[in-house]
Amino acid sequence: MIDFRGGATIESGGRLLAVPVYADRTWGPGAAQAAGAIGDGLEGQLDLLDFTGKLGQVAIVPASGSPFATYAFVGLGDDVDLEVVRQAAGWLARSVSRIEEIATTMHLIDVDGAAAAFAEGFQLGLYRFDKYRSESEPPSVEAVVFVGDDGGAAAEAAAAAAPGIEGAMLTRDLINEPANGKSPETLAGIAAGIAGEYGLHIRVYEPSEFGDERFGGLMGVAAGAANPARMVELLYQPEDPKAFIALVGKGIVFDSGGLSLKPAANMEDMKTDMSGAAVVFGAMKAIASAGLPVKVLGITPITENMPGGSATRPGDVLVPRNGTSVEVLNTDAEGRLVLADGLSLAAERSPDLIVDVATLTGACVIALGEKIGGLWSNDDDAAEQVLRASARSGERFWRMPLPADYRKALDSTVADLKNISGSRYGGAIHAALFLKEYVGENRWVHLDIAGPARWKEEEHYLRKGGSGFGVRTLLALAEELATT
Ligand code: BES
Ligand code: ZN
Ligand code: ZN
């Protein structure tokens, strides 16, 4: 983690000072002083660099003879909110990653929480997944000094953002890890590591227990895989909790489709299919390390979906834990099968709210594109609560309907349900209606992150690969529940 410090002045000097600039080169806090220190040549230099102050622009201007050796002018555009500060900080991080210590006035931008948002965007923007490269250059930035932050309030606010940042980075690491480096057993070990670090309770169910536990969905999906599956339960139980939430995450370590095999093109992306479980781990790490007074139960069914000789066949019937049987007509619709067991377990504990997170359907990506998650809920207040958290985190979700009359598309001729609708349309909705059968009377929110779990381009604080999308929303949700 970066060391955030208060105290420096614009005159104090150093390698680099980063200052914010609004659209049409309207100076933000500290930028006029920086411009004054550089002197006459600045406007010409910014012209050459085509820097107008748009979000996404960063102009690096060397200035000998002034307090700082270099200045970074960071574009904010004309409509500034917390997410803009995060994104501008992310763009800045990309330009200054080789400098050990930078100074900035970005925390003085006039939006509530600017220092924390800067910390998030800056550190997430420095993230890299280099563990498998023989040669790597980790970023050199070690410290950020907030200019004028004499009492250290901004530095403190930035440091307080660490739980969400570290949680999201853990989630990115787990998603980016190739499937041959994250067997269910390995992921259960990661969960045990989090439990050890933060004093959580953990229970790991092994395949020998699945029958007694009636994990029929998980057993069915795991049937074709050589690596043994796991069901992991993590429990964060603070003293005097203000609320109790259950988080359920889809943990398909690799989704080949099973016997309903996926096409070869882009199949490698299906190592991402455990993002739901990774988000649950990251969120629990964040919530526990922030010490929030909210009881959190995390449930993650973890397995590969493979077409081995003992794999579940189309037409097979599975019975998940709550007894609602399923005819499997497509083995590639496996996420809902393992979530059926996870949601059943969560429902038995009667939490105040169940939230499941899953890279559940390609149809959700068709509906909302790659950067917005789908949200379904059986409770308007719960939906609003999560949407508020999402607005704070900058992770965009959009509420989708749960139309009761669509449920009949899941009627099976041999079981209580079938696992696909048989229609080309509304696939993400049918998947959500399927999950609803396993939550009982509990308040429940379903988050489909099939698109945003993996980022396809380099932009601001997101890098290509696992995004950690969802972690900071769940943390923000827990923060709200902690105060009500
Ligand atoms: N893991 C996939 C969904 C997915 C697709 C995630 C693209 C990320 C990107 C899921 O298990 C799946 O294969 N769903 C099928 C369902 C279909 C068979 C009803 C799909 O979306 O095509
Ligand atoms: Zn699938
Ligand atoms: Zn899947």
Image (spheres, rainbow, N blue to C red):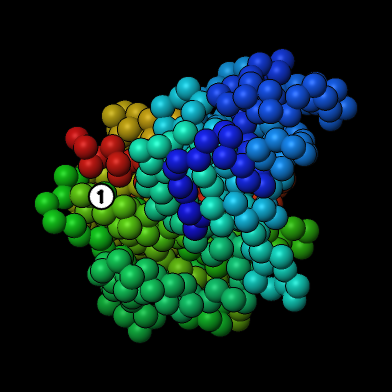
Residue 380: x, y in percent? Answer: 31, 28
Residue 410: x, y in percent? Answer: 46, 45
Q: Secondary structure at mark 1?
A: loop
Front residue of 220/68: it is 68
Q: Quadrant of residue 445?
A: top left
**Residue designated by label 1:** 292
For residue 471, above or below residue 484:
below
Q: Residue at x 31, y 80 (%)?
A: 209
Does residue 327 show up? no
**482 lies left or right of 303:** left
Q: Residue at x 66, y 32 (%)?
A: 74
Front residue of 110/468: it is 110
Q: Quadrant of residue 217?
A: bottom left
Q: Residues within 10 Å of mark 1 (few under 14, many from 20)?
A: many
Does residue 278 show up? yes
**175 lies left or right of 164:** right
Taking the view exactly as shown, the residue that stands out farthest to the right is 48
Quadrant (top left/top right/bottom left/bottom right) for the C terminus = top left
For residue 242, above or below residue 299:
above
Front residue of 26/272: it is 26
The amino acid type of the residue labelled 1 equals Leu
**46 lies left or right of 321:** right
Q: Residue at x 37, y 80 (%)?
A: 206
Residue 132: x, y in percent? Answer: 69, 73
Front residue of 207/188: it is 188
For residue 300, above or below residue 3:
below
**259 lies left or right of 151:** right
